[in-house]
């Protein structure tokens, strides 16, 4: 499967990364026929609406090797798995309450040969490890996400940006973010010019 849009914005992919993204383009539809991890009507837009959307985080921050990232409510592995391909020297821990979706993510990671990914089936309250960043894709309102995951943010800094929470969101966020301190909103259309991204944002919240 071709990955024209990913290679357009990330022209310096290694052959291995290219192969892994191409494999995702086959593996997700294959699994989606059995378990609905991506909306049935949206699976044909897999590359743009799901893989490239996840990779907006890679445009926002270039994780340093050794960074630890928690993907909160990963579902079928988004944004964690595309980011794990992009940053092979970064550790990603994917957590979700829905076991069958996590099974999909784990199988895809295994078939991609990803060695930098671990999985946890359960609630966020059951995860007591520390991470440099928490990432999330439209899981819950940002204030709630901050409340639940702040305990998982490490104190020691190793990246150019302070440790915190990076969430992919869409639509009008004014009400959601009202009163939330230490937050920055970035338009994903700054990175990608497809129409899909016109209403998509990254919300970055630092934990003081």
Image (tube, rainbow, N blue to C red):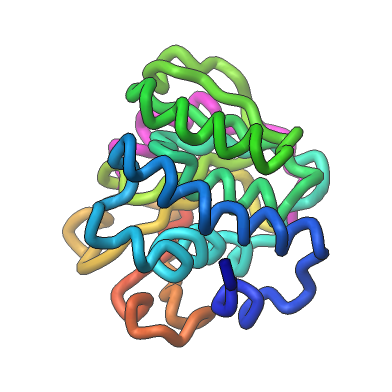
Image location of residue 19, percent across then percent down? 71, 59
**Image quadrant assignment for residue 50:** bottom left
Whole-percent x, y for residue 126 in the image = 45, 13
159 within the magenta span: yes
Kindly tell me whether residue 206 is visible in this rendering.
no
> Could you say which is closer to the camera, residue 94 or residue 14?
14
Of residues 119 and 176, the one nearer the viewer is: 119
Position above or below: 111 against 192 = above
Residue at 41%, 22% in the rendered image = 124
- Residue 156: in sight, yes or no? yes
Nearer to me, 58 or 194: 194
In the rendered structure, the answer to whether residue 42 lies left or right of residue 53 reads left
Please give left or right for residue 152 compared with residue 45 in the image: right
- Quadrant in which the N terminus appears: bottom right
User: Is residue 76 placed above or below 22 in the rendered structure?
Assistant: above
Q: Is residue 113 left or right of residue 174?
A: right
> Residue 61 or 90: which is nearer the viewer?
90
At horizontal 59% and vertical 66% (from top left) the residue drawn is 60
Residue at x 25% of width, y 52% of height: 39
Percent position of residue 192, x then y: 49, 80
Total number of numbered discs in the rendering: 0
- The stretch in magenta equals 142-160
Q: Residue, x 59% and y 30% (percent of image)?
A: 93
Residue 63 % position (x, y): 72, 53
Q: Is residue 95 magenta?
A: no
Residue 119 picture quarter:
top right
Q: Which corner quadrant of the image does residue 100 belong to?
A: top left
């Amino acid at each position: 499967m071709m990955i024209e849009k990913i290679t357009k914005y990330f022209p310096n992919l290694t052959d291995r990364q290219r192969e892994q993204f191409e494999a995702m383009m086959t593996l997700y539809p294959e699994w989606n026929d059995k378990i609905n991890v991506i909306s049935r009507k949206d699976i044909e837009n897999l590359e743009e609406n799901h893989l490239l959307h996840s990779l907006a985080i890679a445009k926002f921050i270039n994780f340093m090797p050794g960074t630890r990232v928690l993907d909160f409510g990963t579902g079928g592995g988004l944004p964690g798995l595309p980011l794990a391909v992009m940053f092979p020297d970064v550790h990603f821990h994917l957590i979700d309450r829905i076991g069958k979706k996590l099974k999909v993510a784990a199988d895809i990671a295994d078939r991609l040969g990803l060695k930098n990914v671990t999985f946890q089936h359960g609630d966020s309250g059951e995860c007591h490890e520390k991470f440099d960043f928490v990432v999330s894709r439209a899981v819950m309102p940002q204030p709630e996400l901050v409340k639940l995951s702040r305990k998982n943010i490490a104190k020691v800094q190793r990246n150019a940006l302070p440790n915190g929470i990076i969430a992919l969101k869409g639509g009008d966020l004014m009400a959601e973010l009202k009163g939330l301190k230490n937050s920055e909103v970035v338009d994903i259309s700054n990175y990608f010019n497809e129409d899909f991204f016109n209403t998509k944002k990254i919300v970055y919240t630092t934990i003081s």
